[in-house]
Image (cartoon, rainbow, N blue to C red):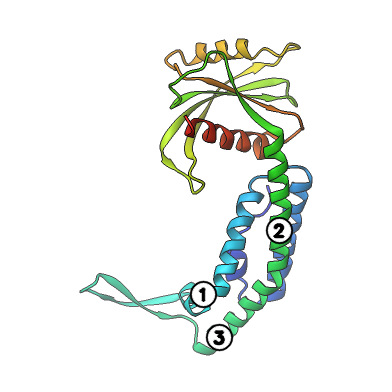
């Protein structure tokens, strides 16, 4: 798992900006290697958040004092808020801010490049991964099954999904996935057989069964399953 791409890589630079650059370069190298192996997550999500956070830092420089350590000196009882003072002296704070912004300006082109590569892989995976309904169409789509073939292990992962009553930032409903069982894939492509086996494990489920199919090889956990979940959320959200 690559090192997390978070704003903490920058805020914790402190008096060692060169060390921070080394750690950032090492983290980016790990994520580039992951993308070369078609491992999309968590890179795709993390680099988007980091890019947005760094751009916001550049827009909100005057608010950055709150990002530095403060010491609690009392309580404003009328508002029930803590009274704090900066731990840094003004000179230390200004020097730290200058180092932070130099680091951000240096890193942003690298972040943009990594973001572009991750988006290219996302678009490629989204194009080559599909979700199809198996068996009779069902009008009740709030819960059901998702079949995900794992060709590397010659097995089919059977997931039971439920639609949660909340929506993500992309306006798709959020899903709760629970692994039900693993079935041998066999030499014959048999989605109807897998569907029957899934219903045997959760007989109370009357929802539809979807199967994930891909015409390219993708890592299961880092790419295939997350994209399948996104496409399933879009599918049930349109119902």
Image coords of residue 76 (percent x, y): 25, 76
Between 193 and 7, the one lying in front of the other is 193
Side (left or right) of 144 relative to 131: left
Distance between the alpha carbons at the discs numbered 1 and 3: 15 Å
Question: Number of labelled discs?
Answer: 3
Side (left or right) of 7 relative to 238: right
Label 2 sits on residue:
27
Give the number of the disc on residue 32.
none
User: Given this view, does label 1 or label 3 mark the residue nearer the observer?
Assistant: 1
Query: Quick one: label 1 or label 3, which is nearer the N terminus?
Result: 1
Query: Quick one: label 3 or label 2, which is nearer the N terminus?
Result: 2
Please, which residue is most extreme toward the left here?
A: 78
Side (left or right) of 121 relative to 7: right
Q: Residue at x 70, y 39 (%)?
A: 125
Residue neighbourhood size for the residue with mark 1, other residues' Cα within 10 Å, grouped as few (<14), some (14–19), many (≥20): few
Q: Quadrant of residue 28?
A: bottom right
Query: Quick one: label 1 or label 2, which is nearer the N terminus?
Result: 2
Image coords of residue 101 (percent x, y): 62, 77
Distance between the alpha carbons at the discs numbered 1 and 2: 25 Å
Is residue 135 placed above or below 18 in the rendered structure?
above
Distance between the alpha carbons at the discs numbered 3 and 2: 27 Å
Label 1 sits on residue:
60
Residues at badges 3 and 2 in contact (C-beta under 8 Å)? no
Q: Residue at x 76, y 32 (%)?
A: 217
Between 179 and 236, the one lying in front of the other is 236
Q: Residue at x 73, y 64 (%)?
A: 110
Residue at disc 1, secondary structure: loop
Label 3 sits on residue:
94
């Amino acid at each position: 798992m690559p090192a997390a791409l978070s704003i903490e890589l920058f805020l914790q630079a402190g008096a060692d900006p060169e060390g921070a650059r080394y750690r950032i370069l090492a983290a980016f190298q790990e994520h580039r290697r992951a993308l070369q192996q078609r491992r999309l997550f968590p890179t795709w999500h993390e680099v988007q958040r980091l890019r947005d956070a760094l751009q916001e830092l550049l827009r909100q420089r005057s608010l950055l004092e709150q990002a530095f350590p403060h010491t609690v000196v009392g309580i404003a009882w009328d508002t029930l808020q803590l009274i704090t003072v900066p731990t840094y002296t003004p000179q230390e704070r200004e020097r730290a801010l200058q180092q932070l912004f130099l680091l951000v300006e240096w890193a942003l082109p690298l972040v943009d490049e990594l973001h572009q590569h991750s988006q290219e892989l996302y678009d490629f995976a989204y194009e080559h991964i599909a979700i199809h309904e198996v068996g009779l169409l069902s009008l009740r789509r709030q819960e059901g099954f998702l079949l995900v073939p794992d060709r590397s292990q010659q097995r089919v992962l059977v997931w039971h999904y439920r639609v949660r009553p909340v929506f993500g930032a992309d306006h798709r409903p959020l899903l709760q996935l629970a692994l039900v069982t693993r079935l041998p894939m066999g030499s014959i492509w048999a989605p109807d057989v897998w569907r029957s086996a899934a219903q045997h494990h959760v007989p109370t489920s009357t929802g539809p069964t979807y199967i994930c199919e891909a015409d390219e090889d993708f890592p299961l956990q880092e790419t295939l399953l997350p994209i399948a979940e996104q496409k399933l959320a879009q599918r049930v959200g349109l119902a």
